[in-house]
């Protein structure tokens, strides 16, 4: 998880959980488990930011050619004195660019609360320049903490295609009543628990063998924005609460 700057294509698929389990043995013929986690498994909790008028939400929902997000991300069991990542994720013409800096979680909260890089010299940063970029983006959009998104991930890395990565995300949950990432993966499911978001991440093109495998298992491409889908669910939950209707079944 040490990469700070990278650019790649990311193709998303929405598949049943049992198809994910069937795919793994075939992937292991040409891939290995990611080096992080046990058998490539780990938990991710991210705090996403947006402006009061939801600029980020609408840019993503309307699929602007250029769009970007800001998030604070932790892996596994996080503590205030442990590592976190402030990350700017940009997408332009289907190419995803990510720029992030490692930062102590306590320092990340201090930065968010104070809204300035004046204290930057006191932070333990892996890349101070990226924090300046975060500050410029945050100031331009007037970004504030908006929602927590969490999920379990199993990740695989190509044996013969060094740029190939495949991830499976499941148990996808969100919350907006508690925006502390160290409180872990707690919230409401915004994707049906029986579904998995698969992402194929590659620098140039998806290998032919993988294209054929996904076709054989009838895996449909599906653009699923974790950020937008979780926002939609939380807003529907509030609407349902106001109208006293308990039948909330919003899934991607």
Image (cartoon, rainbow, N blue to C red):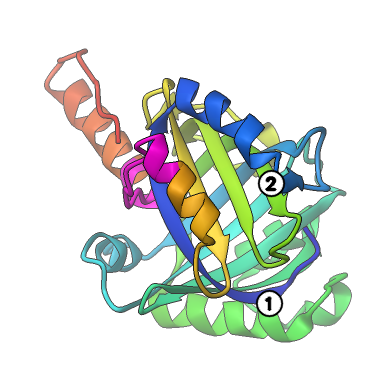
Above or below — where is 50 with respect to 22?
below
Write the residue at 38% across / 31% down.
191
The spot of residue 220 in percent (x, y) is 32, 43
Residue span colored magenta: 214-229
* Quadrant housing residue 124: bottom right
Q: In which quadrant of the rendered view does residue 110 lie?
A: bottom right
- Classify mark 1: helix, strand or loop: strand
Callout 2: helix, strand or loop?
A: strand
Which residue is rendered at x = 69% and y = 57% of the image?
A: 109
Question: Disc 2 marks which residue?
Answer: 156
- Percent position (x, y) of residue 5? 68, 77
Contact (Cβ within 8 Å) of mark 1 with mark 2: no
* Residue 29 appears in the picture as rendered: yes
Mark 2 burial class by Cα count in 10 Å: few <14, some 14-19, many 20+: many
* Residue 146 appearing in the image: no
- Dot 1 or dot 2, earlier in sequence: 1
Queried whether the magenta region covers residue 215, the answer comes back as yes
Q: Nearer the viewer, residue 154 or 164?
A: 164
For the C terminus, the quadrant is top left
Viewer-nearest residue: 205 or 80: 205
Callout 1 crowding tier (Cα within 10 Å): few <14, some 14–19, many ≥20 = few
Q: Nearer the viewer, residue 165 or 61?
A: 165
Query: Which residue lies under the disc numbered 1?
Result: 5
Task: Identify the residue at image location x=31%, y=48%.
Answer: 222
237 magenta-colored: no
């Amino acid at each position: 998880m040490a990469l700070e700057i990278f650019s790649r294509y990311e193709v998303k698929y929405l598949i049943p959980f049992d198809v994910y389990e069937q795919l793994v043995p075939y992937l292991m013929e040409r891939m290995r488990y990611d080096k992080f986690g046990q058998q490539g498994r780990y938990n991710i909790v991210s705090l996403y930011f947006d402006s009061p008028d939801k600029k980020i939400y609408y840019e993503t929902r309307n699929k602007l050619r250029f769009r970007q997000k800001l998030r604070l991300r932790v892996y596994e069991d996080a503590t205030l004195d442990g590592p976190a990542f402030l990350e700017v994720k940009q997408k332009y013409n289907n190419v995803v660019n990510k720029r992030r800096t490692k930062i102590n979680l306590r320092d990340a909260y201090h930065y968010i609360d104070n809204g300035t890089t004046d204290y930057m010299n006191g932070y333990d940063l892996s890349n101070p320049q990226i924090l300046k970029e975060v500050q410029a983006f945050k100031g331009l959009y007037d970004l504030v903490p908006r929602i927590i998104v969490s999920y379990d991930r199993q990740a695989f890395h190509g044996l013969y295609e060094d740029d190939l990565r495949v991830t499976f995300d499941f148990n996808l949950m969100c919350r907006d009543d508690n925006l502390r990432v160290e409180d872990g993966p707690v919230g409401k499911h915004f994707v049906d628990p029986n579904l998995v978001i698969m992402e194929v991440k590659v620098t140039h093109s998806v290998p032919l063998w993988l294209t054929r495998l996904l076709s054989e298992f009838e895996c449909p491409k599906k653009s699923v924005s974790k950020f937008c889908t979780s926002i939609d669910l939380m807003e529907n939950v509030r609407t349902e609460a106001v109208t006293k209707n308990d039948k909330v079944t919003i899934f991607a």
